[in-house]
Image: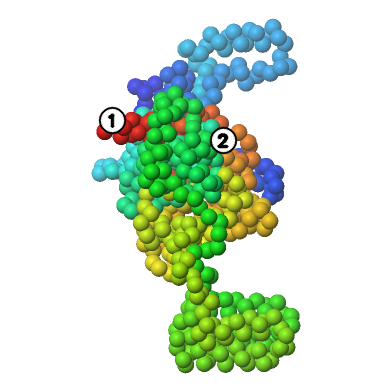
Amino acid sequence: MSGVFDDMNGGFSARLRAHRTTTRTSRMREGEVTVTSQVAVAEARFSLSVLDKLHEPNFIAFRRPTGKRETFIIYEVVGVRPMHYQMLGMDISVPKVIRKEFLETIDSSWKASEETWIDVVAVPTNYRLDVRDDGLVFERSNLTPLVGSEVHILSRQTVKDFLCVEDGVEVGSLIGFDLPLTVKISEMVRYHTGIFGFTGCGKSNLTSYLLRKSLGKISDLSVVIFDVAGEYLIHLLDLAPRLFSTEDFGQDVNRIMDSQAIPETLEEKLDKQLIAGAIQKLVDGGMVQRLSLSYPLEPVPLDMGLLLELFGGIARRREKESIQATVAFNKLNRFVLIRGFDDTTPLEEIAKNAEARAELEEILREFAASVHSMSGTVKDIQSVMTILEGEAPTKGWERAKGMIRNAEWLATKVATEGFGGINIVYVPDPNIARQVVSRFITRLLWLKKTRGVGRTVLTILDEAQEFIPDRTRKEDFTDQSNTSVEALLRQGRKYRANCWICSQRVAHLNVNALQQLHSYFVSVLPRFYDRMVIADAFSLSYDLLERTTDLDIGEWLFVSYKATKQRNVPAFVKTPNNEEIMTANLLRNIKI
């Protein structure tokens, strides 16, 4: 077993003492959330060096005999407790004088005593390790270790073999191992990613760093960042991003800078005039543009789907005209099937086929004749008949096409035209931002479905609780944005339309949307219920999430179903500082 485990030169010796199930419950706005997890407690021989090592993140393995061969069940350490046997019988009811003697005895026993030990608390990774002649084999397993079994610490090399992808992209250094964690970053893009943490923990810093790595790995990637706080232009300034905004800056660099959040740590490294100069280059290059909330780039297509929805809606209501509508709906379905059309077939296309047009007109006339002539549905049918007769309502749109820079225009540019790289959409008003996001995603998915997959488009939603809250209303457009974002998360992967979300208020997010994420980073979340939502949504041990409260800025708990070598194994990482990378690049460009 040499090299597989780290026995700390014979200093580590431990056995499993107990294995139990823990349950935590929290009452939140949606109701009661209960999280259950398995916890193992191992008893290790006490030494200060072992105690210090176990305070860092570690993986341990329990020796486990099976019917076929000996294996090792891998657990992750979540806590350590130095113990002395006199601690077990001491509480506040013991007289003070006796307590003092106990404490003095305990204090003198830590260095060398058979009366001390370390309780090592660990949670399962659901993986087993088999040591074979041809190397190490890691497999998913739900085996439970046996009480009394021997415990080993996984060596640095074994952890590397366990988690790190060969020739992968580094997302950070594994805390406690001084080992770069390499992943398949293309999978983090393809299967959606979440970044969660309290204000100031470095969400935008981490997102910007991961974007750099993604752009370097995925050719022809288009990134669209919806930024309500004004953080990303500065973080990505060296990459010459395009900036779109509903605000009118008048191409004034000072007004642009005033709208953006410049971290204090960055101001210490870069002269403000240097930042202003870089933004001026963007302005001069036409990279800063106004985004309009005006009408769509082109009219909403009138297709068979609208007709089917019209008649289907009347039929389902089981009210007036429902029987006639059901008959018409069934005829329309048969018409679509036989003619080889579908719900996206434009009415103008049907109008070009004389035989198909005549059949559709007959179905519509039959319905109109069977209901009251003043019915609102009859007026709708008359409008459809006008289209079939060749009077297209799109006259004049060709002239306006391309003149309006709005959400639909941007979706077209990033999906089918030349807007690769980074596009930042700065919309400080959440109500307006939700409308822009909804319109952008709706058009993006439509383009992907109708014009082919094309290039990969990554949409990033900063302050995601503004777009996919757990409670929605029509009047503030949260209902509209929630529906669109959830559609993107559910359907987008098939069309290379992917999404990352960043948020500090996890408990206020749409859980259905959360469950579409296959990779996620978690930093400090002070609120208990935020951690409970993550534990529940991702089936993650709450004991692991509790350790995130001790993380420093730039430290994260990272979990992935797709990007790491093994699926769903949590790892604590220290991520690189994007500010340092951006500063170095900006200074280098100026020298050149």
Q: Which mark is residue 591?
A: 1
Above or below — where is 142 with respect to 335? above
Amino acid tagged 2: Phe
Residue receiving disc 2: 198
Asked whether 75 or 86 is in front, the reply is 75
Can residue 552 be seen?
yes
Residues 29 and 132: in front is 29
Please identify the quarter of the rendering in which residue 56 is found: top left
Nearer the observer: mark 2 or 1; the answer is: 1
Tag 2 and tag 1, C-beta contact below 8 Å: no
Q: Which residue is rendered at x = 45% and y = 86% of the image? A: 352
In the rendered view, tell whether residue 409 sits above or below residue 343. Answer: above
Residue 84 relative to residue 339: left or right: right
Task: Say what secondary structure mark 1 lies in.
Answer: helix
Location of residue 322 (image quadrant)? bottom right
Residue at x-position 70% and y-position 77%: 317
Please tell me which residue is depicted at 37% across the width and 49% down the height of the picture.
421
Residue 437: quadrant of the picture? bottom right
- Residue 491 visible in the picture: no
- Compared with 98, 180 (above or below) is below
Give coordinates of residue 310: x percent, y percent.
62, 78
Task: Work out which quarter of the rendered image holds the C terminus and state it.
Answer: top left
> How would you rate the neighbour count of disc 1 (Cα within 10 Å): few for under 14, some for 14-19, many for 20 or more?
few
Coordinates of residue 417 in the picture (x, y in percent): 37, 60
